[in-house]
Amino acid sequence: MDHADIENLIAQALNQGRSVLNEIESKRIVAGLNFPVAIPEPASTAQAAAATAARLGFPAVLKVLSPEIIHKQDAGGVELDLHSEAQVAMAFERIRTNLAARMPTARFDGVAVQPMAPGGVELLIGATRDARFGALITVGLGGIFVELLGDSVTRLAPVSPIDAHAMLSSLRGSAILRGARGGVECDVDAAARLMAGLSELMNEHPAIGEIDLNPVIVHERGLSIVDARIILNPSGIAPAVPSDPNRAARRENLKRAFNPRTVVVIGDKRANSFMWLRSLKALRGQLYSIQIDPAEIAEIEQLGVENRKSLTEIPGPIDLAISAVPRQIAPRILRDCIAARVGAISFFTSGFGETGEEPGIGLEAELRSVALESEIALIGPNCMSLCNPSAGLLNFSGLTPNDGGDVCFISQSGTHTVNFCAQAAARSIQINKAASIGNVTVLEAADYLDLMAEDPATRVIGMYLEGVRDGRRFFDSLSRAAIRHPVVIWKGGVTDSGAIATRSHTGSLQTPNTIWDAVIRQSGAIAAASMDAMLDAIELLARGRPLRGPRMGLVTMTGGQSVVITDTFAAAGLDIPALSSGSYAELKTFFNPVGGSYRNPLDAGGTIDPALRNDNLDRILDILERDPLIDGVVFEISTGLRGAAWAVSEHELLKLLDRLADFNRRSARPFAVILHPAHIEAVVAKAKRLARDRGLVVFNGFEQAAQAFRTSLDYWSKRKIN
């Protein structure tokens, strides 16, 4: 079939009120991909089925034909390995009886008859269409068991044969395709071409909603498409998110808002302790208040902020307005800002679409409609606005300005935005820009991501997301950003209960986790499971060097810790290899093996003098630095034995940290230290601060360090491939 034939077949089915093509129709379409497909022949009686099977050849397969049946196995509608006309006739009657018993209202149109395919490895290969991310391709190992085994991979289309090969290789059971345990090596090239063909088919025929080829039996040469099902989308492809003709100008106004010369706060009140005016007291531009209540104005002026009663009273252009007015007034405030040619406005106000009820939904729709008719950058609503510490643009009074940073953060949660910025400072992570984006009514995550990725000061980007409206645009922006910088994504709503919570938090619609996993992996971004995990990864990515390989050199101070750190790093998929012979020869000349070991990991407590009266620490680290079998180095600082001494005098601790910092400066490999929380918490906390002041990357424990190094390896491995 050519494309015109396929469109005609689809139109005919839709005109008949059918959204599911039968197996014969589905296989005719798949045959158009130039794959050998055994197209079955219909038979409406047992005698016709027997005669058809004899003509096509035994063994034969019968499958029920019914417009109401999607899963034939569940209806008892499949009979395999039939070797005679008599067996075929009896199988026909069993299928009829099963259908009548299990689905009595389903129409029985007979059976499809085809020869049974030779043996091989069974795959499920399919395609579907997501309302936000478009066409998707899935491959799974195990045929009917794919859902039980969970061994499947999904990627966004288009999928090339090279992409398809990578998908097949990432299956947990991919070794089966390569002939493991004495099996035959399968024709994965044929499977990859079929996956690429389905990708093209979905792209060219938007009325196809789903294609399910299950099973596809892959042989030593070629493959057999045993069953095929195509489900149509009667309304055609889901409508695309309308384009924004003012997007370029809107993004320029967003850029203005991040570096404002004039900020106006509308409606700040004593009831919330003048939160916004207090947060912006360090603003390096001009700050104004808009308030008409005389009782509020007096206290605003006591804060040293000039108050006006109208935007028209503000001299010069306004780059950013922050509104804290009740939701019913928000559309009027937006119109006033547009009339005053304000560059951007963020609404702290909540109670819009996230409520799931009117009037919130209607008010948010009104905000969107009004904003799209202008060039204003609408941030939120239901958000904590923008943060640029170098400009004194802060969105919480507990944050402090800086002289410029290199880490950016985008979050649909205002609390997560504030917490990230506060905790980042404690880790010596300097914020470049942060954005709390709330309900993403006009500006979406992609807009902020594009702006931050293009900033030459940016080194790493973190994100907390609950959902996106225009999935394809987000994926394209994420892919571009991840080529330039590590992008670490913490996805909220990964459980069913969490997905429900996101609806009431920011109004985000649920997208299956398999699709999010595909988006993150395929774009080259990296996933984090929590705020702490994201901060750990960002600290290493922003402060450390790229990890180019999985081989770690580990140094501990006790034997028990050396065992645990090995297990932890190995569980994260990192290697702890034996060192080179040259390293062992050098270590043997000075290392004290009594109560220790110079295998990797190095149990070095008996070799490194606690008071650092010898240079053995430097010698050990330099050996690991020179070893060609090591890609990264981690040093555990043991506070258990020396914490009490450090509490009395910092001299020994400072000497240790200076030596480690000196090694970090001269090393070409990523290096980090681990400082466990101990019984002397104040000493550990101070040691971490002093270590970070010296440019060292610090982790609380083995698990945190192992996951961060694994994340770094995942990102830089993808960058190397791309």
Image (cartoon, rainbow, N blue to C red):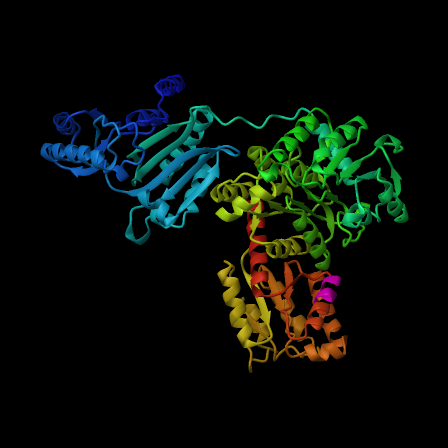
Q: Nearer the viewer, residue 716 or 497?
A: 497
Q: Quadrant of residue 102?
A: top left
Is 541 left or right of 394, judged from the image as shown? left
**Magenta span includes 699:** no
Total labels: the figure holds: 0
**Magenta span includes 690:** yes
Q: Residue furthest bottom?
A: 594
Horizontal and vertical percent for residue 108? Answer: 23, 28
Q: Residue furthest left?
A: 86
Q: Nearer the viewer, residue 722 or 378?
A: 378
Q: Which residues are magenta?
A: 688-693
Horizontal and vertical percent for residue 470? Answer: 58, 33
| Viewport quadrant of the C terminus | top right
Asked whether residue 180 appears in the rendered view, the answer is: yes
Is 160 left or right of 621, judged from the image as shown? left
Q: Image point 35% across, 40% down: which residue?
A: 124
Task: Please determine whether, in this image, residue 201 is positioned above or below residue 694.
Answer: above
Q: Quadrant of residue 2?
A: top left
| Viewport quadrant of the N terminus | top left
Task: Please determine whether, in this image, residue 667 is positioned above or below residue 368.
Answer: below
Task: Please determine whether, in this image, residue 493 is positioned above or below residue 681.
Answer: above
Is 219 left or right of 45, judged from the image as shown? right
Horizontal and vertical percent for residue 364? Answer: 65, 33
Asked whether residue 548 appears in the rendered view, the answer is: no
Q: Image point 18% across, 39% down: which residue?
A: 81
Q: Quadrant of residue 362?
A: top right
Q: Image point 40% across, 37% down: which residue?
A: 192
Helix, strand or loop for the magenta stretch, by majority: helix
Is 420 left or right of 30, judged from the image as shown? right
Horizontal and vertical percent for residue 710? Answer: 55, 56
Q: Nearer the viewer, residue 279 or 183?
A: 279
